[in-house]
Image (cartoon, rainbow, N blue to C red):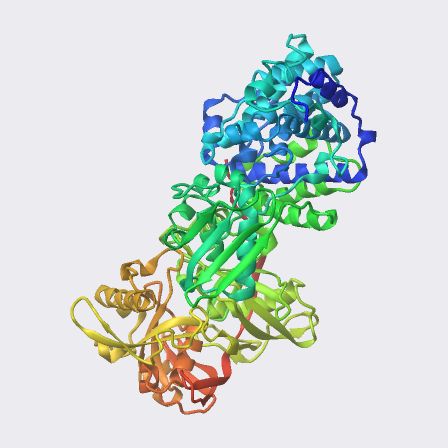
Amino acid sequence: MDTAPATGLTLALAERSAALSYGDLPDDVVQLARQCLLDWFGVTLGGSAEDGPLILLDLLPSADPGDPRSATVVGHGRRLPTLQAALVNGTSSHRLDFDDVNAAFLGHVSVAVAGAVLALAEQRDATGPELVTAFVTGYETACRVALAIGPQPYLRGFHSTGTVGTFGAAAACARLLGLEAERTAVAFGLAASQAAGLKSNLGTMTKSFHAGKACENGLLAALMAERGFSAGTDAIEHSQGFAATAGGVCDREAALGDPPSGWHLRDNLFKYHASCFMTHSMIDGIRGLCASDRIDVRQVSQVTVHVGELELGACAVPEPATGLEVKFSLVHLAAMALLGRGTAVIDDADAADPEVVALRSRVVLAEDGVSGGPTRVDIALHDGTVLHAAHDVSTPESDLAAQQARLRGKFRGLAVPVLGAARADALLEVLCAPGPPAGARQLLALARRPDGGQATVRSVLMRAGTSKGLFFHQADLPAPGPARDALLKRLMGSPDVLQIDGLGGSRPITSKVAIVAPSDRADADVDYTFAQVDIEGDGIGYGGNCGNISSGVGPFAVDEGLVPAVEGRTRVRIHNTNTGKLIVAEVPVRNGRAEVDGDYAVPGVPGTGAEIVMDWASTIGAKTGRLLPTGSPVDSVTLRDGRVVEVTLCDAGNPVVWVRAADLGRTGSESAEEIDQDSALLDTLREIRGRVTALLLPGADWRRVDDPASPGLPLIGLVAPPADYRTLGGGSAAESEMDLRVRLVFMNRLHESIAGTASISLAAASRVKGSVVASVALNRSADTLLIGHPSGVTPTRVRADTTDQAPYVRFDLLGFSRTARRLMDGTAYYPSAG
């Protein structure tokens, strides 16, 4: 390769840039450019409310809405002078590190170009084809400059997004301005003198600032060149020019030659994890192993990730302290992948996650990998088994329709929390509409924060069993992570004891959420995620499932068209993502809709309704993998005050700790007031829950049992033999009508009836010889357990046979019936960001 100065390279690139027209672009290149813009709007909206862009907005005075030299700030209701809008939007677009990359560029091309060209296109009222042509010009030019200087500047510490990206922004804006080749070369000279960005700032806000400065500086370079400002037209190849001072070669042939695919844009790679792209092959490789081999992280002795020089130079933060640093930590991200943590949004909570931090110590980086190829991962287990993966995400997607569908989902997850569902969908449809692409003004008008500060999301309010909650299509919510959690808490009105500014009902049984989507599993029709929104605290729990809310998933799926409605009765197979278990609902259907009218009564619910039969037989070991997680039907727990209490931990539906009421000096017939106001009893129950959890996790601090990630698990209940008592509604429950009494405490408050999953655990435990539950239950029927709870008596179906292997019981039948009813559907409002 000739490393001598490449005479005329700057001008040659300028000539190519100035000559490109919309008619030169193949159809697939236009489609890819539009997909880049689709992705850019998504990641920019998602990053617009983050700290870095907000600091910039605090420092920069707004422009008058009518100022022709101003441009839109994406995700906000403000306008700024055009250059500063490019700065803020460019910074927002890279803030999540969720934006696309190109291997030839060694960085993020779109975020260095789009913020600049969109601000200028809005100001000049450019057409959609003009916008796309300018974007492609900038993208291709940036990749050619990167190939001219080679990888050495990146390895030395220059961040290509900030340095080379400035040339891309200048090229795009020069093309939009219609500059001829010599003026474009001047713009490149001006860009070269502003190009900056150091990798020492990876893992800080300044990394995303590099993209913002590339946009601002590239736009400024083009505008100055348009006005006649002078600069050298050999700024790349000059002996003291950009290539030489950056420490790279100046390879004219590499820069001017066409890539094998014909266009650099065809090699664009979109990101589906919000971390450095060099970590993605590892993440997907680990996830693939976890999916196929069902890895128990407690059995992992060591994880070895084989990486090369590029990865070690960018992604080897050993102990990340912030979410930004996590994005560049292979060891931390490997632990997150093993634990099934989401990577669509990564924040400071992920850096501090104690389980991730503990597992991270078992991840090592081996410096024997090859950068740019598959990332090899070896997972060694304590039994000597070693699992291997070699994954590569660096091949561009050839199915553009499939890529479009995936990008649409990603966009909605990022845009809906900021714009609301209606506005986000309107922008999405304009971005993806067939025919000529839309102009910048139309796009940016929709990318502003909604007037009035309110955003919207589709939702359904349902009563399911003795619980009530909001039901959502998964596609209508952000991806799992802090943005989704914040939205759900805001919709419920938490944290607030009354939830007065939201849709929650100020009780744990009315502060619940169901998130439903079509399932990719062969054995399931829908995926269902349950969320328990804390009322007074700021937590949201996904640790377990809610049996009552589960009974509403089938009717929701039928009414929303997620499953074909079968007249009479529709069978809905529900994969609960919280536990990984399958539940089957038999939903009565009339005229294509879930039937509501019927004669089935649920204690705690006024009136009667259509019976929904729920089969929970597949939920044994819902969270721990075993019916009896400790291996014993009864365990002794020693409390701080010296008392020894016998308990049974039974994991069916959800893990629940069962305690004899008499052992704690209680009858089992207590009212809500008697339990909720008995702080000593609640403290004791919380301690029992914590100490039982510590039995499963040696070394765990029992005091952390109410961790926000799973504030209600394990549940705990007091059990007692049958007896007469008064119900919450003022009626009576007769000893002869029940097998036992139960008082379930959920989130440190008495449950007004009994959680559906708790009834499954209770029924299963009643058939386990020697358990605390079996010691008080009469078990009058071979296939039903009659449970006396505060609201009345509820039957749970259970039939079991004895076996000769622990836990010496096998269930042929395990389930219950509930009713459910849609109460309201439509649009929920919440304050938008910004």
* Residue sitting nearer the eye, 122 or 749: 122
Query: In this picture, is 707 found above or below 150?
Result: below
Q: Residue 390: where, in percent of width, then height?
A: 58, 54
Q: Residue 764: where, in percent of width, then height?
A: 42, 81
Query: In this picture, is 678 found above or below 481?
Result: below
**Which residue: 40% across, 62% down?**
508
**Which residue: 35% across, 84% down?**
740
Q: Quadrant of the N terminus?
A: top right
Residue 328 appears left or right of 24: left
Mark count: 0
Instruction: Kindly tell me whether residue 298 is visible in this rendering.
Output: yes
Q: Quadrant of residue 523?
A: bottom right
Q: Residue 251: where, in percent of width, then height?
A: 67, 24
Instruction: Kindly tell me whether residue 340 is visible in this rendering.
Output: no
Q: Residue 403: where, in percent of width, then height?
A: 69, 48
* Residue sitting nearer the eye, 699 or 429: 699
Q: Quadrant of residue 152?
A: top right
Residue 826 appears left or right of 803: right
* Residue sitting nearer the eye, 675 or 480: 480
**Which residue: 44% across, 66% down?**
384
Query: In this picture, is 279 found above or below 471?
Result: above
* Residue sitting nearer the eye, 21 or 423: 21
Q: Quadrant of residue 416?
A: top right
Q: Looking at the image, which residue sits at the far right?
A: 23
